[in-house]
Amino acid sequence: MAEQTLTGRSAVVTGGASGIGEACARALAERGAKVTVADLDGAAAERVAQEIGGVAWQVDLSDTRALETATVDTDILVNNAGIQRINPIEEFAPEDFRLMLRLMLESPFLLIRAALPGMYQRGFGRIINISSVHGLRASAYKSAYVSAKHGLEGLSKVTALEGGAHGVTSNCINPGYVKTPLVEKQIADQARLHQLPQEEVVAQVMLTESAVKRLTEPHEVASLACWLAGADAGMVTGASYTMDGGWSSR
C-alpha cells in the first residue's frame, strides 16, 4: 500500500520536542505536513522545528487561562503533552493533581475548542489524542494520570460526535509504556513504591501485564498517528487504539 501523503496539511503537536511528540512531529513532516512543534522547552522546540522545516511554539499548556484566547489554525492536532507523578492517594499533592488535569485534560479541550472552527470551515480535521492504556485501565499510585486519561477518552468521543458532520475525526492512541524520558523518569519512583531494585522495575512492574515483553518505540506510536491523520482514516472516529503489547486484553 502506498504511504499516504499529508502534503498541504498543517499540524500542531503538543509536547513535540521530545518522546512521542517529537516522533509524531518528525513523521508528520516526513509525509509532507507543515508542523508546529509546541513545547514548554522553547529551545528544544526550536531545534526540532528547524530540523523538520516546521515552526516552534513555546507554550505553557498548564496556563489554561491563556489558552482560552489562543488561536489554533491547523488541519491536524496531536494532543500529546503530559507529565507523570506517582504517589498513593493519601500522599498525592493536590496541586500536582490539579496541574496534571490542567495539562492533560483541560488544555486538550481548549486546543480542540480553538481548532474546530477552522476545521469546520475547511471541512477537514484530525484530532489525535495521545492517551494511554491508563485511559482504559487503572494502576495504583497514578490517580491524577488515570483520571486525566479517562477524561481525555470521553472528550475525544464527544469531539467525534460533534465533528463528524464537518469532516472532523477524533481518536485516541493508547500505548502502554513507551521508551521515552517520561517513562525513564518513573523508574526510580516505581522502585521506591514497589520496593524493588531499579533494574527490575521494567520487567516486574511495567511489562508484567504485557504479552509482548518490550517497551513500545515512539516511532510506532507516530506511525499510527500518521495513518489517523490521513485520508484513509476518514471513517475512523471516536475510537481508541491500544498499542500496549496485549496489556488491555486481560
Image: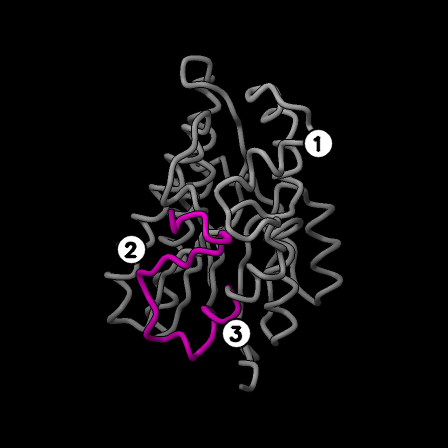
Residue found at the far top of this picture: 90
Residue at left offset 58%, top offset 26%: 190
* Residue indicated by mark 1: 199
Sooner in the amino-acid sequence: mark 2 or mark 3: 3
Crowd rating for badge 3 (residues with CA inside 10 Å; few <14, some 14–19, many 20+): many
Does dot 1 land on a helix, a strand or a loop? helix
Sooner in the amino-acid sequence: mark 1 or mark 2: 2
Counting labels gives 3
* Alpha carbons under labels 2 and 3: distance apart: 23 Å
* Residue indicated by mark 3: 9
Residue 19 painted magenta: no
Q: Quadrant of residue 195?
A: top right
In this view, the mark in front (1 or 2): 1
Q: Report x, y in % for residue 67.
A: 45, 43
Q: From the viewer's perspective, is residue 59 above or below residue 245?
A: above
Disc 1 residue type? Glu
Does dot 3 land on a helix, a strand or a loop? loop
Q: From the viewer's perspective, is residue 40 above or below residue 238?
A: above
In this view, the mark in front (1 or 3): 1
Mark 1 touches mark 3? (CB < 8 Å): no
Look at the image and give the residue range highlighted in magenta. Answer: 225-250
* Residue indicated by mark 2: 157
- Report the side of 203 relative to 97 (left or right): right
Q: Report x, y in % for residue 18.
A: 66, 49
Residue 228 painted magenta: yes
Crowd rating for badge 2 (residues with CA inside 10 Å; few <14, some 14–19, many 20+): some
